[in-house]
Image (cartoon, coloured by chain):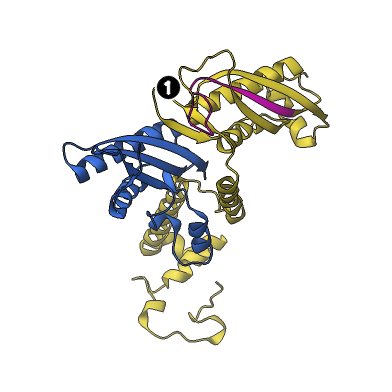
Chain colours: A yellow, B blue
Amino acid sequence: MAMNESGAPDGTSFDGPSEEELLPCGRRLAQVWELAETGGQDPHTAECPHCGEALRALRALEGVVARARDDEPRVPPWDTAALADRVMDVVRLELRPGRTLPLGEADEDAWIVEAAAARTFRAAVDTLPGVRAGSCRIEADAQEAPSSAPPPGRLPRGPARVRVEVQVGLSWNLQLVADEVRARVVGAADHELGMRIAAVDVVVTDLLDEDEDADEDADATEGRQP
Amino acid sequence: MTDQQVPRTLEDTVGAAVLATRGVAFLRPGLAGLLRSSVGLGAARGTTGASGVRVRRHKGSRGLDVEVYVVLNRGHRALDVTRAVRSAVLDAVLKEAGEGGSAQVKVTVTGVV
């Protein structure tokens, strides 16, 4: 804010004393602060204890504001489009939920619809740079004979077998990327769902030309060829 | 056999207990609930008497079969939430039906938001 010596910018007059806070030395507080912020020199301010105290208070205030800003959690801007997408996903799941898969141990009665579990696995796989998850199907593991017939529409309670299709960047070693995908799926099954997994079949359906961003990350990515 | 209906208030009580469980976003909305919320006539979360909770009584006994369908908030382990839901439902049934109350609780996660 540009202010002139008379205290009113461009001849505009202020009403009320709050706009004209004067220091004991007669200088206006706003004028002293503005001069300091713009780097201007004033022999009076350099010598005056009142102006000096006003400037110290200003610096202290700036420090408090800076610390408060640093302490604020970094909340990403609310992405309404992403939220709308997720809500629509839920609506689609309600209309077309697919089969229901067991969560937890054999003697529990907890379940999750296949589409929700598959989405969790695909999201976990997508965190790998240069990897895109495609179709994901979850079946009962044929090696595990169910102790009892499952309820209609539900898989037998026991470890599941996941089959996930992926497209991978050319710089990936295919064996390594398959291992990484398995690790992501098993990790998501354990940490995000609580689902027991017997095996993860990874099918590489395509190779991708990687963009520049992926190249920048290549050095820091374990398992990728230089 | 589980063909005896129970009062709607019990379903509401169970639904409220489920909604109070950490990690639960909302009960599975039926189509009516989805449409209702989409036109601003009421949020799905506030309507517990939806298709997200089914309570039936075992014929000839005080035992209940409770089926709960929930959508979870992202960031919560699904199995842990279903266990908490089961515990909350059992507490609610016990409180409603007294010491002799019992229930088999089936919890199904239908989505994560």
Q: Which percent across, then down, holds residue A213?
A: 75, 36
A158 within the magenta span: yes
Which residue has dot 1 on it? Answer: A105
Left or right: A29, with A171 as reference point: left
Is residue A40 visible in the rendered structure shown here? no
Q: Nearer the viewer, residue A179 or A36?
A: A179
Q: Nearer the viewer, residue B5 or A24?
A: B5
A127 within the magenta span: no
**Residue that appears at 75% across and 32% down:** A214
Query: As shown in the figure, which amino acid type bears the numbered disc 1?
Result: Glu
Q: The residue tagged with tag 1: helix, strand or loop? A: loop
> Residue B64 appears in which quarter of the rendering?
top left
Q: Which percent across, then down, holds residue A1?
A: 55, 72
Is residue B83 visible in the rendered structure shown here? yes
Relative to A21, say whether A109 is above or below.
Answer: above
Residue bounds of the magenta highlight: A150-166
**Residue that appears at 30% across and 49% down:** B6
